[in-house]
Amino acid sequence: MDDFDPKDLLKNSAGKLAPKLGSLTFAQLQVLDAAERGVKEPRKNMLETLQGEIAARREANPGVALSSVSVARLAAILNLASSETPYEELPDDDRALVFEGVSEIVEGTAPPPHSDEEAAFRRVVGGVVPLLLEIEQLQGQRVREVIAEGDMASDGERQAETLVKDIHQLAVCDKDGEVLFRITPEPGEIQLRGGKAVFNRAVDLVREKPRVAVRQVVALDENGRRVARVRWSVDLIGGGGKLATIPAGYIAFSL
């Protein structure tokens, strides 16, 4: 999904886009919906088309609506049966493989099971998904904000000094733009250094929080409009029993 660009697809009319929606993942549909809602004048027929496809996917397979936190919980359950190493302590590549496999199961895109054990796990998933969705609803996790790709507010028309002053909040996101949490900088915590707006406070991904995989941070103005974005090639992982820190100065926006 890293290379998914909603702008190209949204150049189509709703009628031309509709036949293409079946080839998109549920996450991509959500990004498209968020991107259309984020424009100055969202198209009603486009939103109806996207929401209709999203609703149909949820009805056919409720697991598509699970958050990454819940998928990770299921991945940890699967890992318990096949590995002595706790899920959170697996090498990144191994953990990603387990997570991807479970994602395919909950989204209904996995191939037929290869063993009785795998078939049994899928039955467990089918029974647990409604419970996890109920938990997410109680926790408010099903209402997930996604900050889609798009033009930044600057458009090269304002000076960097002005843009630094415009940064009102930082949205810390995963690779798909899903907002994990927000930070409101204190006065003076964002400084202009060599053409970059640098956030000079360290951010702890503390043990008590659910596991998070931070891939990007989006700077927003007071109206929630995107000012700038910084992303990394690998996830910054913390929470879920581990302590990790994003160092001061590591979040730096090119303006």
Image (spheres, helix red, strand yellow):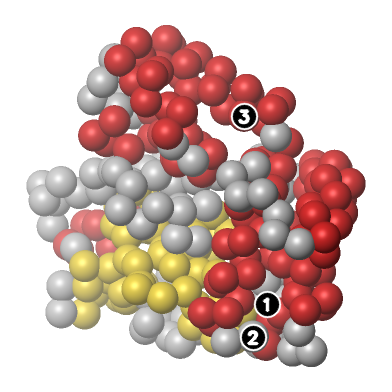
- Mark number for residue 239? 1
For marks 1 and 2 on the same chain, the one whose residue lies earlier in the sequence: 2
Q: Which amino acid lies under the numbered mark 2 shown in the image of this protein?
A: Leu
Above or below residue 159? Residue 202 is: below
Q: Position of residue 62 (x, y in %)?
A: 73, 36
Q: Position of residue 229 (x, y in %)?
A: 32, 60
Mark 1 or 2, which is nearer the eye?
2
| Residue beneath the point at 80% across and 55% down | 119
Image quarter (top left, top right, bottom left or bottom right) of the C terminus: bottom left
Q: Residues within 10 Å of mark 3 (few under 14, many from 20)?
A: many
Up/down of 153 relative to 121, above or below: above
Q: Secondary structure at mark 2?
A: loop
Residue 135 lies left or right of residue 24; in this view the side is right
Give the spatial CA distance, label 1 vs label 2: 15 Å
Q: Which mark is residue 90?
A: 2
Residue 121 in view here? no
| Amino acid at pointer 3 | Arg
Q: Nearer the viewer, residue 3 or 236?
A: 3
- Horizontal side, residue 223 vs residue 75: left or right: left
- Figure check: 83 above or below 36: below
Callouts 2 and 3 close, C-beta under 8 Å:
no
Residue 18, horizontal then vertical, whole percent: 40, 18
Whether the residues at callouts 3 and 1 have beta carbons within 8 Å, the answer is no
Q: Residue 213: in sight, yes or no?
A: yes
Graded by Cα atoms within 10 Å as few (under 14), some (14 to 19) or many (20 or more), the crowding at tag 1 reads some
Cα separation between marks 2 and 3: 32 Å
All told, the count of numbered labels is 3
Q: Position of residue 11 (x, y in %)?
A: 23, 25
